[in-house]
Each structure stands twice: as structure tokens, then as C-alpha cells.
Amino acid sequence: MNVFCLGGKVIGSALAWELIQTFLAAHFSGALRHKRRQAKVQALVDCEEVLTRLAKAGIDIDALAAQFQDEGARGFVKSWKELMACMASKREALK
């Protein structure tokens, strides 16, 4: 998947049209970097399908996401406090 953006204030309409035509006429090269990008887009599609199946099974996706976010934030805060305590003890040891 590619996105094509043109600055309306910095490019004329004739050049913009030529660039768009060239962009749309381009063929998929099959290069590894393009295949990786294509796989990432497919993974997003696959995720949407999984989320749909979970919702149909009665799982509240929004509640689950909120729970994951809360657990992740609590885990980050815990790790941050441990790091700050470790740095403080090392600082004291250097005095």
C-alpha cells in the first residue's frame, strides 16, 4: 500500500497530473522491501478479522483494550520506579 501526497501550494496542476499518472501506472516490482510492506498490510487485515470473530464470540474488545492499556501503564510505572531506585542507589554509592 502506498500513499501519494502532493503539496498543493508547491506543485502545479500539470506536474501533479503527470506524477499521478506515473504513480498509478507503476507495477509491483516484487522486491523484498515491497513484499514486507505488503505483509504488514495483510497483518492489519488479519487483525481486523480476529477482532470481528472475538466480538462475535461476545468478547468486549473495548474493555479488553482498556484492561491491556491499564496493565501496561502499571507495568511501565513499576519498571520506571525500579529504575529510578537503582539509579539513586548507584548515585549514593558513588559519593
Image: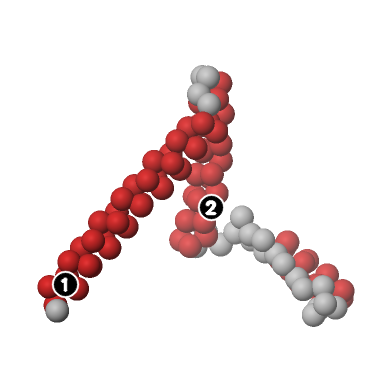
Chain-order first, disc 2 or disc 1: 2
The residue that label 1 is drawn on is: 92
Q: x, y (%) of residue 5?
A: 72, 67
Apparent side of residue 93 relative to residue 50 in the rendered image (left or right): left
The residue that label 2 is drawn on is: 38
* 8, 93: nearer the viewer: 93
Instruction: Report the residue at 39% width, 41% height from top.
Output: 71
Q: Within 10 Å of the Cα at label 1, are there few (<14), some (14-19), or many (20+) other Cα atoms?
A: few
Which numbered disc, 2 or 1, marks the residue closer to the eye? 1
Q: x, y (%) of residue 53?
A: 53, 25
Q: x, y (%) of residue 51?
A: 53, 32
Task: Mark 2 and mark 1 in contact? Answer it, CB < 8 Å.
Answer: no
* 37, 95: nearer the viewer: 95
Q: Amino acid at mark 2?
A: Gln
Q: Is residue 53 visible?
A: no
Q: Quadrant of the N terminus?
A: bottom right
Q: Quadrant of the C terminus?
A: bottom left
Q: Is residue 51 above or below residue 37?
A: above
Apparent side of residue 11 relative to residue 87 in the rendered image (left or right): right
